[in-house]
Image (cartoon, grey):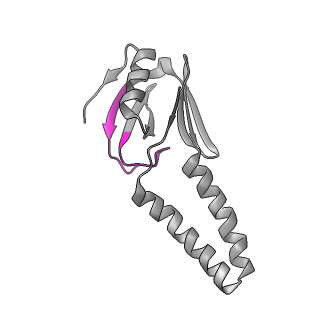
């Protein structure tokens, strides 16, 4: 099952604002050097923005954030809880879930359908501990 990331508008403004400004300056002033920076930057941010998702298979959780990815066995997951942490993670929203696996492993995700994601995770990991904040 594929779960796309929830996207906060404020984060979109923070990520896309400078790129749009660079593109506007390049278009208005004709600075070709600016195009050389703005277009690859826009492509990378677009890859992150539209390429962040979480896939649950029968045996693994695949977390993808643009070119970055992480795969872990569902058997290692032992707890999930809501969080609003600012720690770095494959999450485009502050409406996040903190997933604990192994002895010290942590993954931070922000699925658009958070309840559906947790239900699917619990169905595949019956021993998972669902924690509240």
View extreme (top): residue = 126
Image position of 51 (left or right of 12): right
Q: Is residue 128 above or below residue 110?
A: above
Identify the residue at image location x=60%, y=55%. 46
Residue 11: percent from the left, percent from the top? 44, 58
Identify the residue at image location x=46%, y=49%. 92
Identify the residue at image location x=67%, y=79%. 27
Image position of 42 (left or right of 94): right
Residue 129 among those drawn in magenta: no
Residue 115: percent from the left, percent from the top? 35, 30
Work out whether residue 50 or residue 126 is closer to the camera in this orientation and state it: 50
Identify the residue at image location x=32%, y=32%. 81
User: Which image quarter: residue 57?
Assistant: top right
Residue 78: percent from the left, percent from the top? 39, 22
Which residues, given as a range, are shown in magenta? Answer: 79-96
The mark tally for this picture is 0
Q: Main secondary structure of the magenta part?
A: loop
User: Which image quarter: residue 51?
Assistant: top right
Residue 126: percent from the left, percent from the top? 39, 13
Q: Is residue 28 above or below residue 37?
A: below
View extreme (left): residue = 133
Work out whether residue 34 or residue 75 is closer to the camera in this orientation and state it: 34
View extreme (bottom): residue = 29
Residue 94 among those drawn in magenta: yes
Q: Is residue 7 above or below residue 21?
A: above
């Amino acid at each position: 099952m594929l779960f796309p990331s929830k996207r906060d508008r404020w984060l979109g403004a923070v990520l896309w604002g400078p790129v749009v400004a660079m593109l506007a300056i390049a278009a208005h002033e004709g600075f070709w050097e600016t195009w050389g920076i703005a277009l690859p930057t826009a492509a990378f941010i677009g890859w992150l923005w539209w390429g962040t998702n979480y896939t649950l298979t029968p045996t693994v959780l695949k977390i993808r954030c643009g070119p970055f990815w992480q795969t872990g066995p569902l058997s290692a997951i032992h707890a999930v809880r809501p969080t609003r942490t600012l720690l770095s993670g494959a999450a485009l929203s502050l409406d996040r879930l903190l997933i604990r696996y192994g002895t010290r492993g942590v993954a931070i995700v922000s699925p658009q359908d958070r309840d559906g994601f947790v239900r699917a995770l619990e169905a595949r990991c019956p021993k998972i501990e669902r924690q509240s904040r």
